[in-house]
Amino acid sequence: MSQGKTGRLPLIGGAIAAVAASLCCVGPLVLVMLGIGGAWVANLAVLEPFRPYFLGAAVIALFFAWKKIYRAPAAACTPASLCAMPQTNRVYKMMFWVVAALVALALIFPDLAPLFY
């Protein structure tokens, strides 16, 4: 598998874990703010016991993404490959910080949620 494809996997895993971790808390708030409501929204609270596991998976995936993006040896990329292009590296770094912000939001949201209700 090429370096470009393997560099994306930790970022995708971190994003999925961050979204899954915030489903129990942020999900109902977003749905209510969009005007979508109902008794079924309360069913998302069932995911609350799994939140620490999702957050742990997100932090681990972010660690591996950081390692691939910022600590990857330059020799691992051949000069004509996708990972050697500066545009690709900028996109990966931007995606990394967006996912890191999502994970940080998922970590602190239970403390901020009372401010919105």
Image (tube, rainbow, N blue to C red):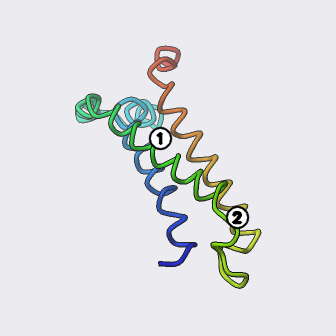
Q: Residues within 10 Å of mark 1 (few under 14, many from 20)?
A: some
Q: Residues within 10 Å of mark 2 (few under 14, many from 20)?
A: some
Cα gap from disc 1 to disc 2, whole angstroms: 21 Å
Location of residue 75 with respect to 21 vertically, above or below: below
Marking on residue 89: 2
Q: Nearer the viewer, residue 41 or 92?
A: 92
Residue at 43% from the left image edge and 32% from the top image edge: 26
- Number of numbered discs: 2
Q: Residue furthest right?
A: 86
Answer with left or right where residue 116 lies relative to residue 52.
Answer: right
Looking at numbered disc 2 in the image, what kind of residue is underneath it? Asn
Residue on which the image places disc 1: 59
Residue at 46% from the left image edge and 49% from the top image edge: 61
Looking at numbered disc 1 in the image, what kind of residue is underneath it? Val
Residue at 73% from the left image edge and 61% from the top image edge: 90
Q: Position of residue 104 (x, y in %)?
A: 54, 33
Earlier residue among tags 1 and 2:
1
Q: Residue furthest bottom?
A: 80
Residue at 26% from the left image edge and 29% from the top image edge: 49
Q: Secondary structure at mark 1?
A: helix
Q: Position of residue 4 (x, y in %)?
A: 57, 72
Q: Nearer the viewer, residue 7 or 96?
A: 7
Location of residue 56 with respect to 48 vertically, above or below: below
